[in-house]
Image (cartoon, helix red, strand yellow):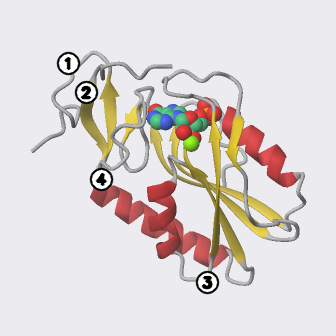
Amino acid sequence: MSAGPPKGSVGRVLVAASELEARVAELGAAITADYRDRSLLMVGVLKGAFVFMSDLAQAIDLPVEIDFMAVSSYGKSTKSSGVVRIVKDLETDIRDRHVLLVEDIVDSRLTLRYLTELLQARRPASFGVCALLVREGAPTDGIDYAGFAVGPDWVVGYGLDVGERHRSLPDVCAYDPDLPPVGQDGGRGP
Ligand code: IMP
Ligand code: MG
């Protein structure tokens, strides 16, 4: 699949870096309280969760272990293929471990459902889910910690991408496919 020339631009800020920082601190405090007596293994879902995972791990006042999985359901497009594929599996044996899955965004729940079934079949001692963003209208059952609800716009920044672009933006922004592309940064330059 060819990436082609970039279409669209980064639009308005939906969740500013300062709000992300404050919410991540709250989530970290809640997780710290809940896992005080359990040794926690955080499992980040690459690539989108890499920034959130890093900040969240530092906001948890416990000696956590971390591991990552990579899955793909969207490829380079903004439409789910409907099929989840493991791109990278865990290095850790999670049997009898207290696992907290860390996701960037839960949208159709396809990825979450797939990963929950896959990881629970490995018999962890407990299984929790923390998602930075949850699409408004998506059922929240099975999500133990959620950062923010977001509307229907595709979002980029703070780890999230469109066709591998804009992951390093510090804010969560709407991506507008109808805005003309502006330079390399998709309209978010100085
Ligand atoms: P789901 O399987 O539809 O719930 O989507 C989950 C995955 O799709 C997320 O972990 C993201 O990687 C990706 N995704 C869904 N919506 C967005 C978005 O608005 N921006 C960036 N990635 C998204
Ligand atoms: Mg993801």
Q: Write down the residue under mark 4.
A: 170
What secondary structure is found at the residue carrying circle 4?
Answer: loop
Which quadrant holds residue 161?
A: top left
Q: How far apart are marks 4 and 1 (CA)?
A: 22 Å
Mark toward the start of the polypeptide (2 vs 3): 2
Q: Of the residues under marks 1 and 3, which one precedes in the sequence?
A: 3
Q: Residue at x 18, y 38 (%)?
A: 188
Please report the residue visible at 42 percent of the width from the left and 29 percent of the height from the top. Answer: 154
Ligand 2 contact, mark 3 (Cβ < 8 Å)? no
Say which residue label 2 marks: 9
Q: Which one is in front, 63 or 139?
A: 63
Q: Does the residue labelled 2 lie within 8 Å of ligand 1?
A: no
Residue 180: assigned label = 1
Residue at image mark 3: 63
For disc 1, the neighbor class at 10 Å (few under 14, some 14 to 19, many from 20) is: some
Q: How far apart are marks 4 and 3 (CA)?
A: 26 Å
- Binning the other alpha carbons within 10 Å of mark 2 as few (below 14), some (14 to 19) or many (20 upward) gives many
Q: What's the distance in space between the residues labelled 2 and 4, CA to CA? A: 16 Å
Within 10 angstroms of label 4, few (less than 14), some, or many (20 or more) residues? some
Q: Indicate the amino acid at tag 4.
A: Pro
Three-letter amino acid code at the position of disc 3: Pro
Residue placed most toward the observer, 63 or 148: 63
Earlier-in-chain disc, 4 versus 3: 3
Of helix, strand and loop, which one carries label 2? strand
Callout 1 amino acid: Pro
Report whether 47 appears left or right of 141.
Answer: left
